[in-house]
C-alpha cells in the first residue's frame, strides 16, 4: 500500500480535471445513422429514436452532440466482464461502474464472488454461516431463520439462485424453519415479472419442503417502497419494511401470488412500487421476527442494504422508532461498508478494492471534489472509493450532497441537475479542486420509471447542465471527461434480443423496460485546449471500458498512471506553435 503517485510534468496553473458521469445514459445504435443525423442536425428529433424508445437519442442534446462530433469521442464498455460481472449477458450497474471508475481496474464483483463461494462450498464452511445458521436453536426448531432480500435474477443486488442455495444449505444443516421476506423487483428485471419468480419459487418449495423442514414466505413489498432505501434518502421506506418483516405489521394476504396480484391491480402498480404485505394463516402472521432468531439479508450489493442492516443491528438507533427490537443473529451476504464494518458478520468476503484514485491522490496531497444528489451521492463517494463511506483525508476531499426530491422522479425528470451544475461551476471558478467527479442521476432514475416521455426530458435536463459546465470549463481551465456508468434511458422499451425490434403486446403496445441495458457508454474529452500538450485517443483499443478512465484522468493531470491501473485512453504529443 505504499504506492506513491508521481508527477511527470509540473502542475499547470489551476488546471482541473472533472469527470461527469451521466448516470444511465448509454449510447446505442453505433451502426445506425441516428448518431450522424443528430450531430449534423442539432435539435431535429429522429423519429427512429422515438419508435425504438431510445430516450438518449430522442432528447434534444446539442451539447452532447457537440462532444459526439469531436475527435476526442468514442464509446467504451460498461457491462459484463469488463466491469467484473459473471458474464457479458449481465448489464452494467452503478456499483460496478463506479468501482471501476474510481479504482482504475476491474475487481471480481459480488455477483460472481457469491457464485464462487456457493459452488466451492466456502460459504457454508465459514464462521458466519456457523454462527447464523448452524445453531442449535434452529436445529431443534425453537427458533427460525429469516432470509430477506431482492427477489429476482437481476444480478445487480441479488440473485434468486443465491436464495435457493441458502435454503438448501439451511435444510442440509438440519434446521427446521425458514421464513422468507421478499422484495419484489421490476427494476433490474421486467416491470411485471414477479409472477415468474413466484412460480419458480413455488416449484422449488414444493420440492424442498417436507415433514422435517418448512420454508415459507412471510412478508414482502416492492423494492422502491419497502426496505431498500439508500443513502438515507427516505427512512420511511425502511420503516415500512421493518414493520412488515419484523413485526408482521402490514396488510394481510394468504399467499404471495395473491398479494402481488391484488396490489398490482389496485393502483396499476409495477412490481417495484408495491406496498408492503404480510402473509397470514387464520389471521396470524406466518413469520414475525423474534429474539434469538437468525436473519440473513441476502443482497450482495451494499447501498440499499445498509439501512435495513442498521435497523436490525444497531442498539442506539434513531432514524425511526422500532416498536419492538428483537435481538437477532444477523448476517449480510457481504460486508456492505468497509469503513463502518457493516455488518460485522457476513457470508462472503467482498472484493478487496484498494489503492483507489482517491486514496492515491489524497496521499499525494491533491484536492478533490465530488458532488451528486442524494440518490447518487454515495455513487461518487462510497462506490467510487471502493465501497467505503469514509474519507482518506478530509482536508483534501470536498464532497457535496444535494438533497434529492422524493420519488417519483418521472414527475420531476430534471431532478437536481441544475443545482449540481450550480455547485460544480462555483467550485470550478474558485479553483477549489484539482480532480473532481460528479454524477447526474436523471437518465438512470427516470429511466427506471419506465416512462419514456419523462426519460427524454431527463436526458435533455442533463444536457442543459452539461452545456453550462462546458461553458464554465472554457473559462476556468477545466478539462471535462464526459461519460456514463451504464445504459438505461437508451432503451425504454424492451427490444428483442435477436432482431433488436421493439417487443409489443397483443394490442401493439410497446413493452416497457425499466432496467439497465448492455449498451456501451459515451466517453468524451472536452476543452483539451487547456492542456499544454496535444492529446489524441489511442487507436486499436476496441475493448476499452470504464476502468480505463482513472489512468486517463491521472495522465491529463500530469501524473504517471500507476502501473497496476488499466491503461489510459489517450496519448500525448508536443504542441506545435
Ligand atoms: C437501483 O438500485 O436503483 C437499481 O437496482 C440499480 O441502479 P443503479 O445501479 O443505477 O444504482
Ligand atoms: Co440504475
Image (cartoon, rainbow, N blue to C red):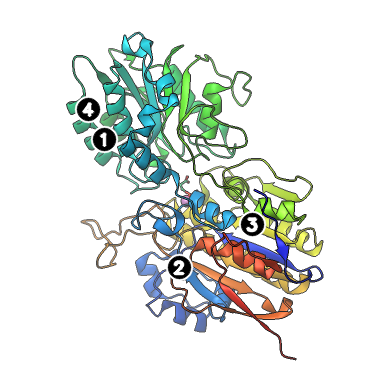
Say which quarter of the image contains residue 554: bottom right
First in sequence, mark 3 or 4: give its number.
4
Say which quarter of the image contains residue 66: bottom right
- At 64% from the left and 55% from the top, the residue drawn is 357
Residue closest to the far bottom: 577
Query: Is residue 547 shown to the viewer in this render?
Result: yes
- At 21% from the left and 22% from the top, the residue drawn is 209
Q: Residue under label 3, please give it.
A: 438
> Is residue 452 positioned above or below 343 on the image?
below
Q: Residue under label 1, please give it.
A: 198
Q: Is residue 162 left or right of residue 213?
A: right
Q: Position of residue 445 (x, y in %)?
A: 50, 51
The residues bearing labels 1 and 4 have C-alpha atoms spaced at a distance of 10 Å
- State which quarter of the image contains the C terminus: bottom right
The residues bearing labels 2 and 4 have C-alpha atoms spaced at a distance of 42 Å
> Is residue 519 positioned above or below 174 on the image?
below
Query: Is residue 41 shown to the viewer in this render?
Result: no
User: Are circles 3 and 4 on residues that touch, CB within 8 Å?
Assistant: no
First in sequence, mark 1 or 4: give its number.
1
Q: Position of residue 173 (x, y in %)?
A: 30, 20
* Label of residue 286 in the image: none
Q: Give the label, 1 or 4, closer to the camera.
A: 4
* Label of residue 27 in the image: 2
> Is residue 353 positioned above or below 349 on the image?
below
* Label of residue 205 in the image: 4
Query: Observer-nearest residue: 327 or 360?
Result: 360
Q: Position of residue 52 (x, y in %)?
A: 35, 67
Amino acid at each position: 500500500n505504499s504506492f506513491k503517485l508521481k508527477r511527470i510534468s509540473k502542475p499547470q496553473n489551476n488546471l482541473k480535471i472533472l469527470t461527469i458521469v451521466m448516470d444511465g445514459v448509454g449510447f446505442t445504435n453505433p451502426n445506425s445513422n441516428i448518431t450522424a443525423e443528430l450531430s449534423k442536425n442539432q435539435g431535429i428529433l429522429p423519429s427512429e429514436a422515438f419508435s425504438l424508445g431510445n430516450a438518449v437519442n430522442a432528447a434534444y442534446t446539442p451539447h452532447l452532440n457537440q462532444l459526439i462530433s469531436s475527435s476526442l469521442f468514442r464509446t467504451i464498455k460498461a457491462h459484463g466482464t469488463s466491469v467484473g460481472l459473471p458474464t457479458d449477458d449481465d448489464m452494467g450497474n452503478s456499483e460496478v461502474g463506479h468501482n471501476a471508475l474510481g479504482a482504475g481496474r476491474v475487481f471480481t464483483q459480488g455477483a460472481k464472488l457469491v457464485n464462487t463461494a456457493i459452488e466451492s462450498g466456502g460459504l457454508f464452511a465459514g464462521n458466519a454461516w456457523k454462527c447464523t445458521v448452524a445453531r442449535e436453536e434452529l436445529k431443534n426448531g425453537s427458533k427460525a431463520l429469516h432470509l430477506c432480500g431482492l427477489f429476482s435474477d437481476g444480478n445487480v443486488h441479488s440473485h434468486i439462485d443465491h436464495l435457493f442455495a441458502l435454503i438448501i444449505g439451511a435444510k442440509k444443516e438440519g434446521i427446521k424453519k425458514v421464513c422468507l421476506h421478499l422484495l419484489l423487483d421490476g427494476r433490474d428485471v421486467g416491470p411485471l415479472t414477479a409472477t415468474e419468480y413466484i412460480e419458480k419459487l413455488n416449484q422449488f418449495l414444493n420440492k424442498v419442503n417436507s415433514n422435517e423442514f418448512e420454508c415459507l414466505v412471510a412478508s414482502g413489498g416492492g423494492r422502491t417502497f419497502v426496505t431498500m432505501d439508500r443513502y438515507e434518502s427516505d427512512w420511511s421506506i425502511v420503516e415500512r419494511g421493518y414493520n412488515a418483516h419484523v413485526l408482521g405489521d402490514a396488510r394481510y394476504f394468504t399467499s404471495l401470488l395473491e398479494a402481488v396480484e391484488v396490489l398490482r391491480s389496485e393502483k396499476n402498480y409495477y412490481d417495484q412500487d408495491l406496498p408492503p404485505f404480510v402473509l397470514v394463516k387464520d389471521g396470524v402472521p406466518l413469520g414475525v421476527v423474534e429474539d434469538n432468531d437468525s436473519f440473513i439479508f441476502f443482497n450482495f450489493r451494499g447501498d440499499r442494504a445498509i439501512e435495513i442492516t442498521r435497523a436490525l443491528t444497531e442498539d442506539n438507533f434513531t432514524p425511526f422508532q422500532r416498536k419492538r427490537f428483537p435481538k437477532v443473529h444477523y448476517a449480510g451476504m457481504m460486508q456492505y461498508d468497509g469503513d463502518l464494518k457493516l455488518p460485522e458478520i457476513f457470508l462472503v468476503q467482498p472484493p478487496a478494492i484498494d489503492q483507489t484514485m482517491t486514496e492515491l491522490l489524497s496521499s499525494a496531497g491533491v484536492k478533490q471534489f465530488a458532488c451528486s444528489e442524494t440518490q447518487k451521492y454515495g455513487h461518487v463517494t462510497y462506490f467510487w472509493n471502493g465501497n467505503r463511506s469514509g474519507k482518506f483525508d478530509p482536508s483534501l476531499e470536498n464532497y457535496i450532497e444535494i438533497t434529492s426530491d422524493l420519488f417519483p422522479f418521472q414527475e420531476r425528470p430534471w431532478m437536481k441537475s441544475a443545482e449540481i451544475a450550480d455547485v460544480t461551476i462555483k467550485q470550478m471558478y474558485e479553483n477549489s479542486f484539482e480532480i473532481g467527479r460528479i454524477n447526474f442521476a436523471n437518465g438512470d432514475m427516470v429511466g427506471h420509471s419506465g416512462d419514456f416521455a419523462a426519460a427524454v426530458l431527463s436526458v435533455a435536463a442533463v444536457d442543459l447542465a452539461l452545456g453550462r459546465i462546458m461553458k464554465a470549463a472554457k473559462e476556468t481551465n477545466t478539462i471535462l471527461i464526459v461519460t456514463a456508468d451504464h445504459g438505461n434511458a437508451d432503451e425504454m422499451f424492451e427490444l428483442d434480443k435477436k432482431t433488436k425490434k421493439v417487443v409489443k403486446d397483443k394490442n401493439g403496445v410497446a413493452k416497457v423496460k425499466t432496467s439497465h441495458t448492455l449498451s456501451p457508454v459515451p466517453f468524451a474529452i472536452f476543452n483539451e485546449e487547456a492542456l499544454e500538450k496535444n492529446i489524441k485517443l489511442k487507436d486499436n483499443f476496441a475493448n476499452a471500458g470504464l476502468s480505463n478512465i482513472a489512468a486517463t484522468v491521472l495522465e491529463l493531470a500530469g501524473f504517471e498512471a500507476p502501473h497496476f491501473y488499466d491503461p489510459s485512453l489517450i496519448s500525448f504529443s508536443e504542441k506545435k506553435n
